Image (spheres, helix red, strand yellow):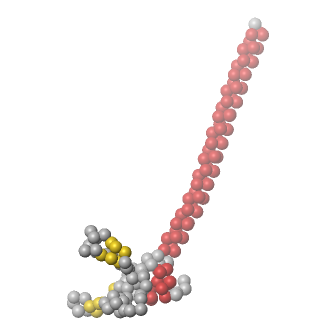
Amino acid sequence: KRKSVRGCIVGHDISVLNLVITQIGEKVIPGLTDDSVPRRLGPKRANNIRKLFNLTKEDDVRKYVIHRKFTSKKGVETRKAPKIQRLVTPLMLQRKRARKAEKLNSVLRNKEDAAAYKKIVAQRLAEQREARRSLISKRRSTRKSQKLAADAN
């Protein structure tokens, strides 16, 4: 049997068609467009909750989370709500400050280490220069003494 969607012929090998209603016409289709089904879950992300309820950054998002009430197997009525993601908490801010301080300390430590290394390198160079000077002066003095000895003979 041919299946058709609004006059368009669809392949006969397709068993199911998933369709979305984009616009409701004049007549109501019973069981389809006559009743509205609310969304089961509310937003989980903090900014999406703010957007839904037109909240400012100062408002507490936790008060506006959509809860779901149900009775448990024991007969106790309980409420379930999603864990809010991307919520700025004091702990998050503390961790952010700690990361920033760690970066700053690392930069300072690196500067100190570089300065200490430069100092050691300069000291070693000075020692090498001094050793070279003393070696050259030793050679000169031995040459002088040899020259003097040769002149004396």
Residue at image coords 62%, 42%: 121
Q: Extreme left residue here? A: 74
Q: Position of residue 33 (x, y in %)?
A: 36, 89
Q: Quadrant of residue 79?
A: bottom left
Q: Extreme right residue here? A: 151
Which of the pair 153/18 is nearer the observer? 18
Residue at image coords 55%, 85%: 56
Q: Position of residue 128 (x, y in %)?
A: 65, 34
**In the visual, does 137 lie left or right of 57?**
right
**In the visual, does 152 lie left or right of 138?**
right
Which of the pair 59/137 is nearer the observer? 59
Q: Position of residue 2 (x, y in %)?
A: 28, 74
Q: Quadrant of residue 26?
A: bottom left
Residue 89 in sight from this viewpoint: no
Instruction: Identify whether 133 is placed above or below 78.
Output: above
Q: Position of residue 150 (x, y in %)?
A: 74, 10
Residue at image coords 66%, 32%: 131
Instruction: Identify whether 81 is placed above or below 136.
Output: below
Instruction: Identify whether 72 is placed above or below 115.
Output: below
